[in-house]
Amino acid sequence: MRLDELSEFGWIERIRRAAVRAGVPRHVVIGIGDDAAVLRPRRGEDLVVTTDALVEDVHFRWRTDPARCVGARAVAASLSDLAAMGARPLGVTVAFAGPPGLSVRQLDALTSGILAACRTAGAPLVGGNVSRARRTSLTVTAVGAVAPGRALRRDGARRGDRILVTGSLGRAALARARAEASGSPVRHVPEARLAAGLRLARAGFVGACIDLSDGLLADLRHVLRASRVGARLVLPAVPRPRGFDASCRRARIHPATALLAGGEDYELLFTVRSQAPSAAALTRRLGVHVSEIGSVVARGLHVEGASTGISGGYRHF
Amino acid sequence: MRLDELSEFGWIERIRRAAVRAGVPRHVVIGIGDDAAVLRPRRGEDLVVTTDALVEDVHFRWRTDPARCVGARAVAASLSDLAAMGARPLGVTVAFAGPPGLSVRQLDALTSGILAACRTAGAPLVGGNVSRARRTSLTVTAVGAVAPGRALRRDGARRGDRILVTGSLGRAALARARAEASGSPVRHVPEARLAAGLRLARAGFVGACIDLSDGLLADLRHVLRASRVGARLVLPAVPRPRGFDASCRRARIHPATALLAGGEDYELLFTVRSQAPSAAALTRRLGVHVSEIGSVVARGLHVEGASTGISGGYRHF
């Protein structure tokens, strides 16, 4: 069956049923099916809202990206923004747009990926929109809550802060390079660092925080610009998956390019005051591996240990 | 200048500056420029979230729709959903997608329409996303707040309720018919009935409420299905603009079709208990003209005074 054989309401009903099967938590007062969703935060919480879009032939390609992974990545991208604010997710809305010829099997796989990512994060799908369009796209809005005044920001870095990052970088860039080279599917689905973000928002020693969506250098520059400081980055300290350099060589990309400019890692980059716990202590505290990769200085962006072959984003300012 | 001459950050910065010029109310803790927006509701409020999309060649056409009107309509559609829930708007996010050849002048006009609609409603633009795409689209998420348990719902209509509607219907359908016939621009920009919705949510006598986006019959059917009731609708009582029937004849559409199946009116359709104030008293109370157009019965949808020439949505069930 194709999308043009479903009515708008048939399409919505299909998504609604899958969302109900996935479970509706108690803080959802009204879910899919009314004019809007109603969610109940805790008393006195601030509200966190973010929107992100995945567009066919811009952010994914049907030729290489399985629908389930596309759905999951769309949700992960928005939830990652909540993580970067230290927010607890309350719910997600998705605006689906698809061409008439899209198969309902593909649509169901998109929905299934969306709901899988929602379930992992404890963030129910509570509403959205469906529309015809020339190309498929998913626009995901995530809504969350945070204790008043405790949201993590981009503009809190201070000279002398240490710069840390969760997990390891470059996996998404490597998966894309492999898909480009061999047509192998991009099965990489990142997971938003929500638990780590929540714990960072409760800690008193965090300067700035951002999630790595555009790439380490580009996102670090956002922090530096907002905080009006500079940074020293130690490339060999940037965490990478096991066997990464060899895999990059096979996929014919430069490891430093993948690490510094890769994007879509959805790890958290954050700064802490100099007297904050060590990376090892933070690893225990956040429940995810944390690496120290540099420090905040007065101005400029200095990358130590970088070869000269880095493209796509590396730039002093 | 064209969109492909702007970087992603140049594009965001253009929108951010316009939003800041439009004014940022105090409940916006963090606006455009961080990973997510942070909004401060009043203590104990429920959260209301809704997403709607306007897609080029599906919901609007550059040939007939001025960019400023497209932007304003995209926001009005989402705010209208908040109005239908009785919610107070807190903020709006917009995901812009546009082709490389879109002129920055068009983009600025879209943004200006968005901000004008935001300003009218007291709902600041607090975030969003920008992306390349084959066709232009705007996906608007509106976030609002309502006193706990007071959100207006679709499923609250009871047999014996009276059915009322704000304002007058058919204007959008007429504007579209004129554009089809003569290529004249569609300047019609509806305004969400936020103040009326707020007052209805405070009243104790409202059964169900919905905003008229799909058309009177289609939206009434949503209410009837959710509430498991039927309705008797009196077509001559459906409010229409002055000179409407003659304008419809000139534009070669059937007035009843425009009234019953037109869509995009963004008026509120609601039911009240039989002992509730009269339409005249409700008109004074809501600050907008209110007409009584029928009543809730056990089952079926009966339209009285309808000719047989109605197309596009009219159907007994």
Image: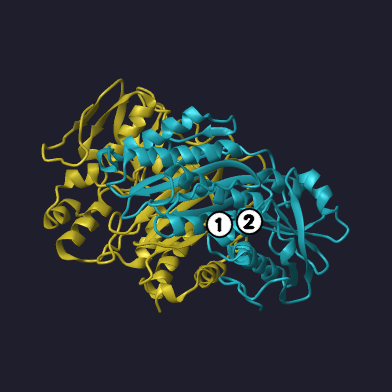
Chain colours: A yellow, B cyan
Tell me the kind of residue under disc 1: Leu
Quarter-wise, where is residue A160 in the image?
A: top left
Q: Secondary structure at mark 2?
A: helix
Q: Position of residue A271 (x, y in %)?
A: 38, 32
In the displayed structure, A258 sits above or below A66; it is above
Q: Nearer the viewer, residue A245 or B51?
A: B51
Quarter-wise, where is residue B180 in the image?
A: bottom left
In the displayed structure, B240 sits above or below B45; it is below
First along the sequence among labels 2 and 1 = 1
Q: What is the residue that sits farthest to the right in this orientation?
A: B275
Q: Nearer the viewer, residue B55 or B28?
A: B55
Tell me the kind of residue under disc 2: Phe
- Residue at point 47%, 45% (across, down): B71
Residue, disc 1: B174
Circles 2 and 1, Cβ within 8 Å, touching? The answer is: yes
In the displayed structure, B238 sits above or below B144; it is below
Q: Position of residue B203 (x, y in %)?
A: 80, 49
Q: Residues within 10 Å of mark 1 (few under 14, many from 20)?
A: many
- Residue at point 25%, 32% (across, down): A233
Q: Are marks 2 and 1 on the same chain?
A: yes
The answer to whether residue A126 is seen in the rendering is: no
Q: Is residue B19 left or right of residue A317?
A: right
Q: Mark 2, chain letter?
A: B
Determine which of the numbered discs, if any, sits on residue B244 in the image: 2
All told, the count of numbered labels is 2
